Image: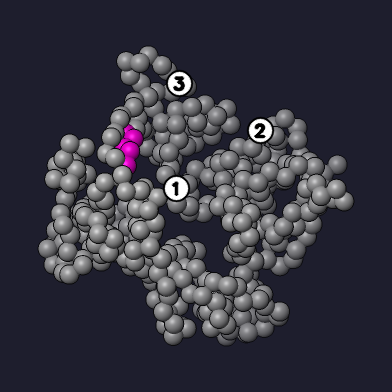
């Protein structure tokens, strides 16, 4: 008999790896509980690449038709470029004669893909709990993993399992080296009562709610701000509290805009600016236009990598960062910037070259013969 507090297998993470694992187990009669701190659909940066053989698994799951109906792009192959400029092209259907499950790959935004695959896990019988963050592993007297400790933001509970599968990606990797990351579901103030959450009904209700949250979590070592497409006033308030309480204030980028098909959305820089105003402190930026990430990439490539060329669509961020590490800055006008803006760039933001499509890239002198 199933229990809400236990399962044969607990899968942590509802992305494609976790959802497909839960699907495979559930269809074979295993009692599976899948936990994810997010609520789906949710955006997630990703290369969005599915090989032809991935389509075989998706077809087995009954997900392939839905993915194609959702507008997945059709991929004929790929080009792989090495740091030294050597490149080769591979096509899924060519004279080599090999044929996979299909002759094409697919690409689909994770926001759409993950929700489709997760629904197939549910249909197979897996129990799915969204908005539930795993805080720790449970261990028996012999130190064997026997479950997890999880929180939905309101209460914490122990969930027992014979097997625990970790499919929560980077968060688990950070935890393995001792870096704790608080999930959104754990942040205070993110589950307001209906009256406080309703826009325009009772503005004072949200203030009352946020000032009477009870015991607040300790101040973390750092608040790191990136792009958050589900930003709320409560998240800003908690970040403000932590920064004013002594946490380091770090941002991944100051990009002012986030380009999507047909329009621009506010970039991470909008959130950074709001918190800088709210705290009176300036964030340390570890992404563009600061040189840290580019410098680390160059260090890893080593001196034999040769010339460094940075291609980007923002003079103030991509080109400035390129010049701060001594790289050639190439501005492409297919994103945030048009030719007029490119012509008006000054100082560090002045590109070394301006191109209008990636086809023009290998005609540049720095990449001649690549």
* Residue 94 shows in the view: yes
The answer to whether any part of residue 203 appears in the image is: no
Label located before the other in sequence (3 or 1): 1
Determine contact: label 2, label 3, CB under 8 Å. no
Q: Residues within 10 Å of mark 3 (few under 14, many from 20)?
A: some
Dot 2, crowdedness within 10 Å: few (<14), some or many (≥20)?
A: some
Q: 326 or 354: nearer the eye?
A: 326
Front position among marks 1 and 2: 1
Relative image position of residue 119 (x, y in whole percent): 60, 42
Q: Earlier in the sequence, mark 2 or mark 3?
A: 2
Q: Residue at x 17, y 64 (%)?
A: 350
* Image point (26%, 46%), residue name: 306
State the count of labels: 3
Helix or strand or loop: what does disc 1 sit on? loop
Magenta-drawn stretch contains 228: no
Q: Earlier in the sequence, mark 1 or mark 2?
A: 2
Measured Cα–Cα span from mark 2 to mark 3: 22 Å
Q: What numbered label is drawn on residue 46?
A: 1
| Position above or below: 140 against 121 | below
Q: Residue at x 34, y 66 (%)?
A: 290
Answer with left or right where residue 59 lies relative to residue 302.
right
Residue placed under numbered mark 2 in the picture: 24
The residue indicated by pointer 3 is 100
* Residue 292 located left or right of residue 4: left
| Label 3 – label 1 distance at C-alpha | 24 Å
User: What percent of the width, then of the height, locates residue 181?
Assistant: 60, 63
Q: State which region is magenta.
A: 79-83
Q: Which sits in the foreground, 91 or 142?
A: 142
Element under disc 3 = loop
Can you say which quadrant of the picture contains the N terminus?
top right
């Amino acid at each position: 008999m199933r229990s809400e507090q236990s399962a044969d297998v607990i899968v942590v993470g509802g992305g494609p790896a976790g959802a497909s694992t839960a699907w495979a187990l559930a269809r074979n009669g295993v009692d599976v509980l899948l936990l994810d701190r997010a609520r789906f659909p949710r955006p997630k940066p990703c290369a969005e690449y599915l090989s032809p053989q991935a389509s075989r698994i998706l077809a087995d799951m009954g997900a392939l038709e839905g993915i194609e109906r959702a507008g997945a792009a059709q991929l004929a192959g790929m080009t792989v470029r090495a740091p030294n400029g050597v490149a080769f092209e591979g096509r899924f259907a060519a004279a080599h004669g090999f044929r996979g499950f299909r002759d094409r790959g697919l690409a689909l935004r994770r926001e759409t893909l993950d929700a489709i695959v997760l629904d197939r896990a549910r249909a197979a019988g897996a129990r799915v709990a969204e908005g539930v963050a795993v805080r720790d592993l449970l261990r028996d007297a012999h130190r064997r993993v026997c479950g997890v400790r999880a929180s939905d933001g309101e209460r914490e509970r122990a969930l027992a399992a014979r097997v625990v599968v970790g499919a929560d990606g980077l968060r688990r990797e950070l935890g393995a080296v001792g870096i704790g990351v608080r999930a959104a579901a754990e942040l205070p103030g993110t589950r307001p009562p209906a009256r406080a959450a309703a826009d325009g009904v009772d503005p004072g209700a949200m203030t009352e709610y946020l000032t009477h949250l009870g015991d607040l979590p300790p101040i973390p070592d750092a608040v790191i701000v990136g792009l958050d497409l589900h930003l709320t006033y409560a998240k800003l308030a908690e970040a403000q509290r932590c920064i004013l309480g002594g946490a380091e204030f770090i941002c991944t980028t100051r990009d002012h805009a986030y380009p999507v098909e047909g329009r621009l959305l506010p970039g991470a820089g909008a959130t950074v600016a709001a918190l800088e105003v709210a705290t009176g402190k300036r964030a340390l930026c570890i992404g563009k236009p600061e040189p840290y990430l580019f410098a680390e990439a160059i260090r890893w490539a080593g001196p034999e990598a040769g010339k460094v060329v940075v291609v980007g669509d923002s003079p103030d961020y991509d080109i400035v960062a390129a010049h701060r590490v001594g790289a050639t800055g190439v501005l492409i006008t297919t994103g945030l910037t048009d030719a007029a803006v490119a012509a008006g760039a000054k100082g560090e933001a002045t590109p070394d070259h301006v191109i209008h499509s990636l086809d023009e890239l290998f005609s540049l002198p720095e990449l001649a013969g690549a």
